[in-house]
Image (cartoon, rainbow, N blue to C red):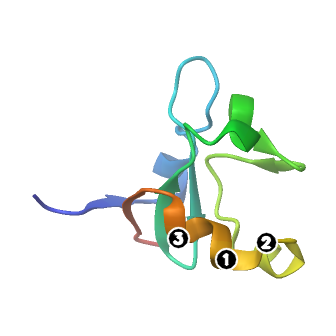
Amino acid sequence: MAEKTFTTTELLQFDGRNGHPAYVAVKGVVYDVTNVPQWKDGKHHGNLAGRDLTSVMPRSLHMESVLKDIPVVGKMTD
């Protein structure tokens, strides 16, 4: 199965609201945070699903260690 690719505009559709899945991108990898309780309604500590969060990871308490258990759904193309 081919890996899904997302543009920035396409990723915005996965905002975790109105029944949509919640995806976030970090360093070009797209993760599905839909079933992560901390991402209820597509929000977590002021961050929004459907966005590239690479720039906020250095300020995260957990850094990228939390991503190891999150399903990968694809890659960013831009």
Residue bearing mark 1:
64
Q: Quadrant of residue 12?
A: top right
| Secondary element at image label 1 | helix
Query: Depth check: 28 or 12 in front?
Result: 28
Tell me if 22 is positioned left or right of 66 in this view.
left
Amino acid identity at mark 1: Glu
Tell me if 19 is positioned left or right of 53 in this view.
left
Query: Depth check: 56 or 77 in front?
Result: 56
Badge 2: residue crowd in 10 Å (few <14, some 14–19, many ≥20): few
Q: Are marks 1 and 3 in contact (CB under 8 Å)?
A: yes
Relative to 30, does residue 68 appear above or below in the rendering? below
Badge 3: residue crowd in 10 Å (few <14, some 14–19, many ≥20): few
Q: Position of residue 25 (x, y in %)?
A: 57, 64
Q: Residue furthest left?
A: 1
| Secondary element at image label 3 | helix
Question: Which residue is found at the position 89% from the left and 50% from the top?
Answer: 45
Relative to 16, does residue 5 appear above or below in the rendering? below
| Secondary element at image label 2 | loop
Relative to 16, does residue 73 appear above or below in the rendering? below
Amino acid identity at mark 3: Lys
Q: Position of residue 9 (x, y in %)?
A: 53, 51
Q: Are marks 3 and 2 in contact (CB under 8 Å)?
A: no
Q: Quadrant of the N terminus?
A: bottom left
Relative to 25, does residue 59 appear above or below in the rendering? below
For residue 78, which numbered disc appears in the image? none
Residue bearing mark 2:
62
Q: Residue furthest top?
A: 18
**First reached walking from the N terminus: tag 3 or tag 2:** 2
Residue bearing mark 3:
68
Question: Which residue is found at the position 50% from the left and 34% from the top?
Answer: 21
